[in-house]
Image (cartoon, rainbow, N blue to C red):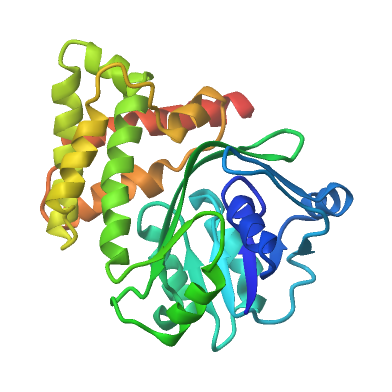
Amino acid sequence: MRILVVGAGATGGYFGARLAEIGRDVTFLVRPARAEKLAAEGLRVKSPVGDVHIAAPKTVTADTLSEPFDLVILSAKAYDLDGAVADLRPAVGPRTAVLPILNGMRHLDVLDAAFGTERVLGGTCSIVATLTKAGEIRQMSELHSFTYGERDGARSERIAAIEAQMEGVRFQARSSDKVVLEMWEKWVFLATLAGATTLMRASIGDVVAAPGGPAFIEGLLDECQAVATANGYGSREKVLAGARKILTAERSPMTASMLRDIEGGARIEADHIVGDLIERGRKAGIETPILARVLTGLKAYESRRAREAA
C-alpha cells in the first residue's frame, strides 16, 4: 500500500514516521523548504516510547505530485485545509482512501465535496507533540492513539488493508465501527477544554479553583453535548462521565493546544472547533450562549492578531 501523509509536522510527521519505521511505503507531501530539510537531516522524532530517525524519508511537493496513492492521511490544520485539498488532488484517484485526522466535523463536508463521500473515511487521533524550530518532532507524553473506520460502520476491504499496514506499529492504532460517534465525542471534549481554557486564559485546575469555575465548565460541556445529541451523536454515558471528571479535576495543569497557540501569537481553529459547533446547534434549535461567548473571545484574538500584523 502506497501511503501519502500530508505534512510532516507534529501530528502527520509523527504517525508517518512510525509507519515508515516498520517499513511501510510512506511519502510525505511537504513544502519545498521542509523537503530540503528532511533530505539533509532526515525525519527525527524524540519520544518517551522510543526515538526514531528516518534518515531518508520519501517526500513530494505540490508541484511534483502527479499520481494517485492508495491511502492519504490528512492532518492539516483546519485553516490550511483548502490549500491542502488543492495540493493533494493529483494523489486522489478512483480507488484512493482519504483518511483525515482533523478535529471537529466541518472538514468532512469539504473533503466530500472535493473527492466524493465514497473516498473519505472517518478518523481521529490523540497525541501531545510539537515541532521544534530545528524541525524535530517531540512527543511530550505517551498518548498516541489513531482511530479510523468507514463512516457507515461497515467492515470493508480497505479497512482490512489499513489494519494490515498498522500491524506492528509503535502507536495505538484501532479500527472502529463507530468512528463518527468517536469523532463527535472528541469534539465535545475538545470544544469544552478549548472553550474553558482560552476564555479564562488558564488551566483546568485554575478555572476549577475560581469562584463559579466548576459550574462554568459543566455548563459549557452540557452545551456541547446538547449540540452533539441534537445531531444524533451524543457522547456515550461512560465517555461523557470520563470527560466531565477530567475537565473538572482540581489542580489539573491541562490546557488546550489552542490556548498555547494564543499565548504564542499563532493562528487558531476558532471557526472549525467552536464556530461550527454553534452553527450546528443553531440549525438544530439548540441555544449555546456560553459557546457564543467563547467564540467572541476567539474572534477578538484573531482581530487583534490581524491588526497587529498589518
Q: Do we see residue 288 in this rendering? A: no
- Give residue 156's quadrant in the image: bottom left
**How many labels were placed on the picture?**
0
- Residue 91: where, in percent of width, then height? 64, 76
296 sits left or right of 102 in the view: left
- Residue 112: where, in percent of width, then height? 42, 74
Q: Residue at x 78, y 50 (%)?
A: 34
Q: Do we see residue 209 in this rendering? A: yes
Q: Specify the quadrant that holds the N terminus.
A: bottom right
- Residue 110: where, in percent of width, then height? 44, 66
- Give residue 305's quadrant in the image: top right
Q: Residue at x 58, y 37 (%)?
A: 48
Please name whichever residue, 297 or 93, is drawn nearer the observer in this view of the structure: 93
Please name whichever residue, 149 or 307, is drawn nearer the observer in this view of the structure: 149
Q: Residue at x 66, y 64 (%)?
A: 22
Please name whichever residue, 230 or 252, is drawn nearer the observer in this view of the structure: 252
217 sits left or right of 180 in the view: left
Q: Specify the quadrant that holds the C terminus.
A: top right
- Residue 104: where, in percent of width, then height? 36, 53
279 sits left or right of 222 in the view: right
306 sits left or right of 211 in the view: right
